[in-house]
Amino acid sequence: MPDLALYQPDIPQNTGTILRLSACMGIAVHLIEPAGFPISDSALKRAGMDYLERAVLRRHLNFEAFDDWRREHKRRVILLTTKSDQPFTGFSFQSDDILLLGRESSGVPETVHDGADARLTIPMVGGMRSLNVAVSAGMVLSEALRQTDRFPKTLT
């Protein structure tokens, strides 16, 4: 199943929204610390609502710990970035990919960018900088789930 990873997120509401997305899609979220806010139910509750208890959240103390974990499990890291010319729409996702989203304020450092297995962007109208990180996560995760036939089978 594709997972999402958040690199040192700044905004608890976005993290809560992404955790809600993960609960609804049955995927895990890897939170790479430190975050720009206290990781607590109260910080995430407003956006995540009552979905937080159903979300699978794996915390990693830093990027090195996350990178060690993903290499041990032989998982590709697919970075979503504005610093790429490869659109996500033309990429072939695998069922065990981890979609990495950078900090809302600054993305990821060059070392993380360079170490990703692939770097993808979301095509946008000229002159626009970026989308909200939770919107970006939903768009690209949807394509990864579609390609790998991993959407939940039960409709509510």
Image: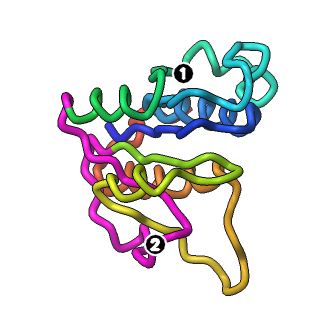
Q: Quadrant of residue 92?
A: bottom left
Apparent side of residue 125 relative to residue 66 in the rendered image (left or right): right
Q: Quadrant of residue 114?
A: bottom left
- Residue at 71%, 17% (x, y): give it: 50
Apparent side of residue 87 relative to residue 15 in the rendered image (left or right): left
Give the image location of residue 129, x and y in percent: 70, 72
Q: Amino acid at mark 1?
A: Ala
Which secondary structure, mark 2? loop
Give the image location of residue 39, x and y in percent: 67, 18
Q: Amino acid at mark 2?
A: Ser
- Residue at 54%, 21% (x, y): give it: 55
Q: Look at mark 1 in the image and give the residue it sits on.
A: 55
Which secondary structure, mark 1? loop
Residues rendered magenta in the picture: 72-97
- Residue at 32%, 67% (x, y): give it: 91
- Separation of residues labelled 1 and 2 (CA atoms): 30 Å
